[in-house]
Image (spheres, rainbow, N blue to C red):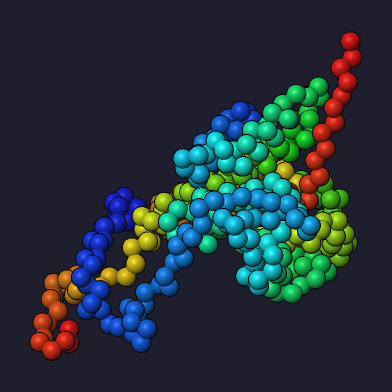
Amino acid sequence: MAALGAPLRTLRALLRELRHAAGRSYRDSPAYRHVLAAFRAHRVTSEKLCRAQQELHFQAATYLCLLRSIREHETLHREYHGRGERSPQEVAGLVGFRLPQQPGGKG
Amino acid sequence: LWWAHSPPARLPRPPPAAAESCPVGPCGRRAYAPPAERKRFYQNVSISQGEGGFEINLDHRKLKTPQAKLFTVPSEALAIAVATEWDSQKDTIKFYTMHLTTLCNTALDNPTQRNKTQLIRAAVKFLETDTVCYRVEEPPALAELQKNEWDPVVEWVEKRYNVTIGSSTSILGPSIPASTKETFVSHLASYNMWALQGIEFVITQLKSLILSMSLIDRHITVEKAVLLSRLEEEYQIRRWGNVEWAHDYDLCELRARTAAGTLFVHLCSESSTVKHKLLQD
């Protein structure tokens, strides 16, 4: 079994990610309710190594990784790759030129 | 390493008036502008159950695949995750962040039109060019790192499936015995078509059948699998420095895709039952 740490930590991080993703009404979102219900259902078990519990924990950790890396990827994209193309004025300005102003539309 | 230590220069925002004097193509837009993004056109996302499975509703409209089929998924948890993806889109819809939706669309449409045998064959074929089987001889630090990190995973898979794989430093790679391939073929045949699409996707992302199987068998986490897949890159990063806008960008994207694929496989092949034990007094 993968080294996952405490289920509570995964659950809290996952709920925090869902909060970022959803916005205002995150507590009513189906994902939030489903995750909480699933964790509650698998909480009580008499077995020490409950397979279903570990499977759920792994799934939660995977979903957490998914949400977190999407958010980080989005942040990086916006910061470094989301600017689009420079306009001709800016390109000229990079080397210190200015575009000529011609009456009649060109330039 | 100037780029590693100082942030890149910020581009100034183009002023709105600049749009008029740009080279105008036949459609009236700038020549190399990216296509306009789809705005979020729905308020609420909800799930409903139909005959084929669970469906996604955007306001009152039912979601459809790119080939105009009705979007149905077999698992409720998967439907909830897809609905969350659609709900988390803010002003514009960024399809490149919606990995689970893409996987469902692929499973429903099957655009490459492969059947189960072909999918399994494509997946097992990756074993011949598996990343963890290709070792370098130098630099010795990297060879050592590969031995310490990859050998345990290969051994675990060999033990779990009772096969021989091995590793090789030659350019041709290891010679995989036919019995090994047959074992994997028959193991993968136990998954349904949807799960197989997910498995093949994970293998393509990680470039390794061994890492994918140990991930799907829950032996390693997604972060660990991605780290092992990018081992040489991590080694070079530790040596020469990290470039955030390239390395971290690729790392996050790979993690997102691998996590989506793994989750997809597990949600498509699970069957959960809750057994209530009687308390004994």
Q: In the figure, is residue B187 to the left or right of B250?
A: right
Residue B9: in sight, yes or no?
Answer: yes
Residue B175: in sight, yes or no?
Answer: no
| Image spot of residue B198 (x, y percent) | 70, 58
Q: In the figure, is residue B105 to the left or right of A28?
A: right
Kindly indicate the quadrant of the structure image that contains residue B122: bottom right
In percent of the image, x 63 and y 44: which residue is there?
A: A62
In percent of the image, x 74 and y 30: which residue is there?
A: A42
Extreme-bottom residue of the structure: A104
Q: Is residue A68 above or below residue B9?
A: above
Q: Quadrant of the C terminus of chain A?
A: bottom left
Q: Nearer the viewer, residue B11 or B102?
A: B102
Q: Nearer the viewer, residue B233 or B218?
A: B218
Q: Is residue B213 above or below residue A23?
A: below
| Image spot of residue A32 (x, y percent) | 59, 38
| Image spot of residue B101 (x, y percent) | 62, 59
Q: Nearer the viewer, residue A77 or B70?
A: B70
Q: Is residue A37 above or below residue B38?
A: above
Kindly indicate the quadrant of the structure image that contains residue A81: bottom left
Q: Quadrant of the N terminus of chain A?
A: top right
Kindly indicate the quadrant of the structure image that contains residue B51: bottom right
In percent of the image, x 88 and y 21: which residue is there?
A: B278
Q: Nearer the viewer, residue B53 or B235?
A: B53
In percent of the image, x 85 and y 27: which residue is there?
A: B276
Extreme-top residue of the structure: B281
| Image spot of residue A44 (x, y percent) | 75, 24
Q: In the figure, is residue B209 to the left or right of B97?
A: right
Q: In the figure, is residue B89 to the left or right of B127?
A: left
